[in-house]
Image (cartoon, rainbow, N blue to C red):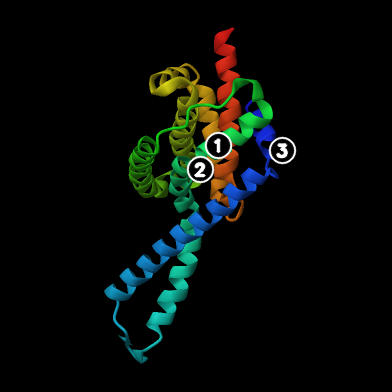
Amino acid sequence: MIFGDFFKALGQLGDRRFLKVVGFGILLSLALLFGVYVLFVQLLEWLTPDTLTLPWLGEVAWVDSLIGWGSFFLMIGLSVFLMVPVASAFTGLFLDEVAEAVEDRHYPALGRAQRLPFMDALIDSVNFFGVLVAVNIVALLLYAFVGPFAPLMFWAVNGYLLGREYFQMVAMRRLGRQGARDLRKRHSGQVWIAGMLMAAPLSLPLINLVIPVLGVATFTHLFHRLAEASRR
C-alpha cells in the first residue's frame, strides 16, 4: 500500500504546482550546499598555511589548489548527508502547496484544509532541523563502526525522523497537533517504513532533489489512507 501511495505521487510529478515547488527546492538545495561548501573551504584555508615545506621537495605552493579540489569532491560526498536536513527544511516552506495539489486532484470532496500558521511551521521546522543535524552528526561518528551496514543505519535513523516529521505536518492540517500525533503513533510502523523509502533515494545525487516533493505527496496519500481506515 505504501508503494501505491508513492506511485500516485510519482504520477503527479508533472503537475504545474509540483514543478514550481521542485524548482524552488532545487534552488534552495543548491544554495544551502554552496553556502556550506564556501564555509568549509574558508575553514580549511584558515587552518592550513599558504605554502608547505616538505623534506627533499622544499616549499610546496599548490596547497590551496589541492584543498580546493579535495574539498569539492568531499562536499559531493557529504551532500548525501546534507540533503536530509535540506528535506526537513523543505517541509515547513512548501508542504501546504504540495499537499493542496494532491488533495485537489485526488480528494476534491474534502475541501481545503486549514493551512499551518507560518510561525508554527517555521518553529517546528527549525526545531526538527536542529534535532536532525544533531542526530546525523552522532550517527556519522558511528558509521565507521558498523561497516557495510552504514547505509542501513542511515536509512533507518533518518527514515524514522523524516517519516515522523512529514506525517505529523501533513496530518496537522486536518487533525490538529494532538490528533496528528495520535494517528502517527497508531501507525508508527507504516510511517517509519515510508520514511525509510524516502531516506534511501535522498542518498542519490540529483535524484534527491525531487524527493522532498514526492515525500510530501506520498505522505499526503498515506495520511488520507490511514485516516480513512481509522474511521471504519
Q: What number is the disc on residue 11? A: 3
The quadrant of the rendering that contains the N terminus is: top right
Under tag 1, what secondary structure? Answer: helix
At 43% from the left and 81% from the top, the residue drawn is: 65
The first of marks 1 and 3 along the sequence is 3
The first of marks 1 and 2 along the sequence is 2
Q: What number is the disc on residue 216? A: 1
Query: Which kind of residue does numbered mark 1 sit on?
Result: Val
Foreground pick, 92 / 68: 92
Query: Which kind of residue does numbered mark 3 sit on?
Result: Gly
Specify the quadrant of the image occupied by residue 104: top right
Residue 183 locus on image (x, y percent):
47, 18
Disc 2/disc 3 C-alpha distance (Å): 19 Å
The first of marks 2 and 3 along the sequence is 3
Disc 1/disc 2 C-alpha distance (Å): 9 Å
Specify the quadrant of the image occupied by residue 59: bottom left
Foreground pick, 210 / 81: 210
Question: What residue is pinned by disc 2?
Answer: 94
Q: Are marks 1 and 3 in contact (CB under 8 Å)?
A: no
Disc 1/disc 3 C-alpha distance (Å): 14 Å
Residue 53 locus on image (x, y percent):
30, 87
